[in-house]
Amino acid sequence: MSPRSERTNRELRRTSQERILAAALEVFAEQGYENATISQITERAGVSRGLISYYFATKQELLRAILARWLDGMLTMLDDLAVDGPPDELLAAVIDRALVGASNQLGTQRLVLCLMLQPGTRPVYAQVERDRADAMRAFEDRLRDIFEARGAVDPAVEEALLRSVLEGVLFKLAVYESGYPLAAVRARLYALYDLGAPTPLPLPADAFGESGRLRAPLD
């Protein structure tokens, strides 16, 4: 039998890491970070404890990898947008990508929100942010450039406000799931920024229901 190629080995390593991270995400979500154990993650992933230790020496390293992946996805959200595109079009794209991304990854979104706030995990998230200081600044500057092009008096305040509004929407979506009127809220955000009528998006079918009173679903 011929030895595996380096490309094959890389793919096997990537597949193993993906399986471990997916299992860790599920276990953290079910048990909470503090209560989750490596043994539970090992069983969920269907791999040996030694393999997990090879890639992630500690539970905290698993946590760091999950948070880093989520943050990297957020920071690259605008990478393929034209720098000189119409500012209204760019702003609409920011809103849409944030909402669609969150609706497609509710489990991850819910867990990350918890991990950002819990005393035992917040320092890890803060360090992940610090490790990406340049990317964070570039992301913030990109949003500020969009608001400056729209004629905002204070683009920095507008950037902070937009992120606060979107993060509030994502929090409510993570808590209330199908009870949250995502499509109606998206339309309201378009109106808030005078972006015209929103075009159709691949949102979940229940996102188009009528606005109602928000209640957390029973598991």
Image (cartoon, rainbow, N blue to C red):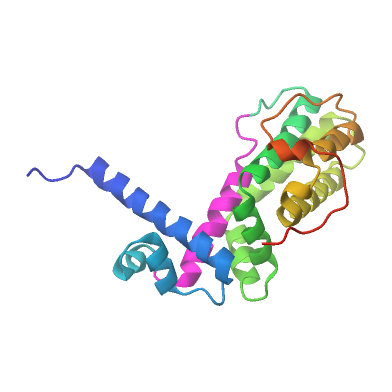
Image quarter of residue 77: top right
Q: Residue shown at 59%/54% (left/top)?
A: 132
Where in the figure is residue 88, as x and y percent of width and height? 81, 27
Q: Looking at the image, which residue is at 85% across and 41% down?
A: 155
Quarter of the picture holding the N terminus: top left
| x and y, in percent, of residue 83 in the image | 68, 27
Residue 199 lies in quadrant: top right
User: In which quadrant of the rendered view does residue 218 lie?
Assistant: bottom right
Question: Is 72 within the magenta?
Answer: yes
> Which residue is nearer to you in this view: 149 or 210?
210
Instruction: Answer whether residue 29 is magenta in the image.
Output: no
Residue 167 spot, x, y in % from top left = 76, 51
Front position in the image: 152 or 64? 64
At 65% from the left and 69% from the top, the residue drawn is 122
From which residue to which does the magenta span run?
56-80
Which residue is most to the front?
Answer: 218
Residue 214 against residue 99 in the figure, above or below: below
- Left or right of residue 89: residue 124: left
